Amino acid sequence: MFGIEMPVLVIIALVAVAAGGFAYTFLFTSIETQNKSDQRYKQVKRQETDSKALKMARDSVNEAAKRRKSVQESLKDLEEKQKKKVNYASPPLKIALYQTGWGINVAQFYIASVFMGLAFGLAALLVGTPLFVVAGMVIVGFLGVPRWIVSFKRTRRFKAFLDEFPNALDIIVRSIRSGLPINDALRMIATEAQEPLRTEFKRIVEAQQLGMTVPQACERLHENIPLPETSFFSIVVTIQAQAGGNLSEALANLSRVIRDRRKMKAKVNALSMEAKASAVIIGSLPFFIMAAVYMTSPGYIMPLFTDPRGHLILGVSAVWMVMGVLVMRNMINFDI
């Protein structure tokens, strides 16, 4: 029986193989077509994904290029505006008086200058100095001393502003990160900061209330306080308003830069302190020697004040003294 079943099984197997071969022969074309279709579909899908990624990358690059171009145009416009503005390093008298914070006008300044010039001339006349010395003292009291006082007050106010400016920037950064708009942050500084910061930021808030934008109001801050730090602040705010960006991060970096600049200035002052002390000693030495000679031998030095030739010597010496002091001042002053 086993011998009979074995051929039957072989025949069945052969029939099955033959049927499979015929089936594969007739279905091969359709199967190959389906495989090619699947591969083509996957390839098209992959190309669509790659094209979308490429388009997104291209759009991102174009957006970055547009933003960079906008920033460059903003910087160019700001530079052109700065060139057209008045030189605030040596401003006109009206602007210098405004920057002192005294609240006086040019007419009041000239009236005070006239009184000071008359006081200097009267003091020189009472001492008994010659008329040309009296005239010189009047000129110094009218033109020299008042303007020096204005320059000194202006510089001192700028220094006080710069000492508190990084703290104000930190307040703005924390306010923006906590969700407050920049207008509220500026208003907070205008009400709680110390002088002269409070007055200047109050002017920014008032300018916004009159219809100015925040960048325009911040540009006026640089006009009132012409320092590089205020220029950086107005540039950062203007670029953020025109091109977008993280304002809190930019202001935090600006605060760090201002503190680093102040540290560098302190280091330079410490290193140049020896030269400044030498300049003070050299500048004051002639006066000490003159006082010592007058106390020990008055008759020896009095011809300088009584004889016309002595007046000439004193005048030439004063000119050379002023020139030497100015040269030493330029040698020991460093801009950071």
Image (cartoon, rainbow, N blue to C red):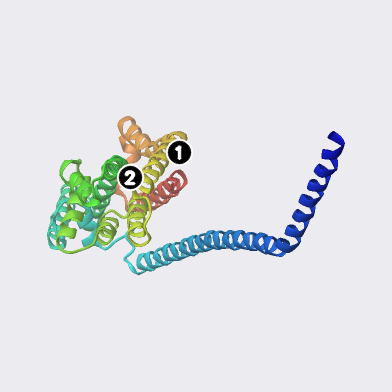
Percent coordinates x, y for residue 106 in the rendering: 16, 62
Q: Secondary structure at mark 2?
A: helix
Of badges 2 and 1, nearer the viewer stands 1
- Spatial CA span between label 2 and label 1: 44 Å
Percent coordinates x, y for residue 143 in the rendering: 24, 58
Kind of residue at badge 1: Val
The answer to which of 160 and 96 lies nearer the viewer is 160
Kind of residue at badge 2: Pro
Can residue 134 be seen in this snapshot? no
The residue carrying mark 1 is 268
Can residue 151 be seen in this snapshot? yes
Residue 171's disc is none
Answer whether labels 2 and 1 touch (C-beta < 8 Å).
no
Q: Residues within 10 Å of mark 1 (few under 14, many from 20)?
A: some
Percent coordinates x, y for residue 314 in the rendering: 35, 49
Instruction: Kindly indicate the quadrant of the structure image that contains residue 112.
Output: bottom left
Seen from this angle, which residue lies furthest right? Answer: 3
The answer to which of 181 and 5 lies nearer the viewer is 5
The residue carrying mark 2 is 303
Side of 8 where 200 appears, left or right: left
Side of 27 where 212 appears, left or right: left
Relative vertical location of residue 63 with respect to residue 264 in this rendering, above or below: below
Relative vertical location of residue 297 with respect to residue 54 in this rendering, above or below: above
The number of numbered discs placed on residues in the rendered structure image is 2
Image quarter (top left, top right, bottom left or bottom right) of the N terminus: top right
The answer to which of 56 and 116 lies nearer the viewer is 56
Earlier sequence position, callout 2 versus callout 1: 1
Q: Secondary structure at mark 1?
A: helix
Q: Residues within 10 Å of mark 2 (few under 14, many from 20)?
A: few
Percent coordinates x, y for residue 98 in the rendering: 20, 57
